[in-house]
Image (cartoon, rainbow, N blue to C red):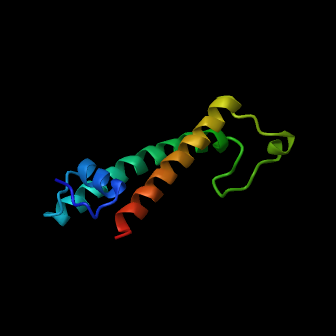
């Protein structure tokens, strides 16, 4: 039975992490797995976005002159922007997840 002093979010987090409050080490390990998984997905999306930009930027980060004509991603604007929003979603999730786990 859950502690009545817990918020719905805390109860849900405990259920997802499989923590009943008796093993904080286990809860921390589970938290790290979740954050690592979401972070891995975010890094993969960032890598996809960088691949789209890489042809127009030097390794030192200098934008090449042809970018002045306008950037058109090889995958097309809809997919490129979808990847940006996906990256934001992953980063927001990690941020909320970490805030919820430290707000005790």
Foreground residue among 64 and 102: 102
Foreground residue among 100 and 5: 5
Is residue 11 visible to the viewer in this orientation of the structure?
yes
* Picture residue at 43% right of the left edge, 64% below the top: 99
Q: Is residue 71 rendered to the left or right of residue 90?
A: right
On screen, residue 3 above or below 49: below
Q: Is residue 1 rendered to the left or right of residue 103?
A: left
Residue 83: quadrant of the picture: top right
* Picture residue at 67% right of the left edge, 30% below the top: 78
Q: Quadrant of the C terminus?
A: bottom left
* Picture residue at 13% right of the left edge, 64% below the top: 22
* Picture residue at 72% right of the left edge, 43% below the top: 56
Furthest residue to the left?
Answer: 22
Foreground residue among 52 and 15: 15
Residue 20 location (% of width, % of height): 17, 57
Furthest residue to the bottom?
Answer: 104
On screen, residue 81 above or below 76: below
Is residue 74 visible to the viewer in this orientation of the structure?
no
Q: Is residue 27 rendered to the left or right of residue 8?
A: left
Residue 3 location (% of width, % of height): 22, 60
Residue 75: quadrant of the picture: top right
- Please state the total of marks drawn on the protein image: 0
Residue 52 location (% of width, % of height): 63, 38
Furthest residue to the right?
Answer: 69
């Amino acid at each position: 039975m859950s502690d009545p002093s817990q918020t719905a979010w805390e109860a849900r987090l405990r259920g997802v992490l499989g923590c009943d409050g008796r093993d904080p080490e286990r809860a921390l390990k589970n938290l790290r797995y979740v954050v690592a998984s979401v972070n891995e997905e975010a890094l993969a999306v960032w890598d996809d976005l960088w691949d789209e930009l890489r042809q127009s930027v030097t390794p030192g980060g200098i934008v090449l002159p042809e970018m002045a004509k306008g950037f058109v991603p090889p995958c097309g604007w809809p997919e490129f922007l979808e990847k940006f929003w996906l990256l934001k979603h992953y980063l927001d999730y990690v941020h909320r997840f970490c805030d919820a786990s430290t707000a005790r």
